[in-house]
Amino acid sequence: MRVALVCPYDWSSHGGVRAHVAALGAALQEDHDVRIIAPASRPLGASGVDALVRPVGRAVGIPFNDSVARVALSPAAARRTVRALRAWRPDVVHVHEPLVPSVALAAAARSPSPVVGTFHAWSDREAAYRAIAPLGRRVVRGLDARLAVSPVAERYAARTLGLDADELTVIPNGVSADRLGRALPRPELLDPSEPLIVFVGRLEARKGAEVLLRAFRLLHRTHPHARLLVVGDGPERRRAERLVGDLPGGRARFAGAVDDEEKARLLASADLFAAPNLGGESFGIVLLEAMAAGLPVVASDIPGFRAVCRHQHEGVLVPAGHAAALAEAMGALLDDPAARKRLGTAGRERAAEYSWPRIAERVVAVYREAGAG
């Protein structure tokens, strides 16, 4: 089957939807002919998933959901997208966030092939979809199948676009469980006497890094040997570094942005994973990655994360934005190796349910129901 995956966000920048599309493309490539259509602001590599990408224009940053979305807004990018689809004639076009201009919206509205749309977004505000609701409803009604990555994303899309719940199917994000489970730790990071907490995410307000750093300062009073590794980059990095700049050397380190292989090794080197996100997450993919690596998870009690940590034995959830509660939960787990082991084992089992081969099978079944060959 020839499958075109359409990503509206800059392929040159890290992001949840881009990571989802990349991993799905890699999983589908095992049995299908896959191309990815996306904007790209920098030249891409010639190997791996990048080799599947057909760039259609440059991206610009626009504020969205307390973050910055890098999308292509030009009509030229929309025209290139449609030309690419008409020239290749895929059996199915899978558009991620089909209402995001201009690449995804053009693919969803003008594709010559059956179109499957996946909705990723969730917000506690309705402006995101309501701003284009009249056009959006026409485009969404024209899709051959509609997916959402989580129950909260499903409810958000249904509520704001006037859909019935049974018009959307939830197929969650996947995780590279085998790769994460096999990753080798960084030997220089291993020290049983100095437990390592790791955070992975973009350094921007809604990811909650500032909350974690304030929590780590509190934790340092009772657990002075604990270490924190911040993985990721973004506009809040300098502020974040200043928040812990007076702690003893090496207690809090910033690794910057890393590739998937290095991220897996850093997760394998840690004792605890912290996800202090403040909201706007439709699904806890960062939690699943940590769980697949065998890490116990302490995370904010937000809807997208509750979809992953359904029970107390799968992770510890604390009030979002509450640094003291986060510090207390991390300290309790650092003091209880048996609890960390139990959570890590349960997390691996939970993450296995989301392995990409399993998720890709479910997606392909939707393609066939939508009329793909």
Image: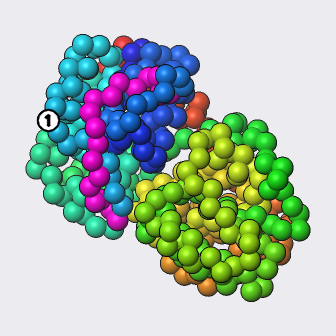
Residue with the most extreme left position: 134
Region of the chain picked out in magenta, as a range: 49-66
Residue 106's x, y, as percent? 19, 33
**Does the magenta run of residues contain 326?**
no
The question of residue 64 being in magenta is answered with yes
* Quadrant containing the C terminus in the rendered view: top left
Whether 52 is drawn above or below 231: the answer is above
- The amino acid type of the residue labelled 1 equals Pro
126 relative to 27 in the view: left or right: left
Residue pictured at 41% horizontal, 39% vertical:
12
Q: Residue at x 12, y 45 (%)?
A: 135
Q: Which residue is mark 1?
A: 75
Q: Nearer the viewer, residue 243 or 8?
A: 243
Question: Residue shown at 44%/36% (left/top)?
Answer: 21
Q: Residue at x 61, y 51 (%)?
A: 288
Horizontal side of 246 relative to 233 (left or right) equals right
Colour scheme employed for the rendering of this structure = rainbow
Q: Please, is residue 76 above or below residue 71 in the view?
A: above
Q: Quadrant of residue 192?
A: bottom right
Location of the N terminus (image quadrant): top left
Question: Residue 83: percent from the left, percent from the top?
Answer: 20, 20
* Label 1: how many Cα within 10 Å (few below 14, some 14–19, many 20+): some
Helix, strand or loop for disc 1: helix
x and y, in percent, of residue 126 in the image: 25, 63
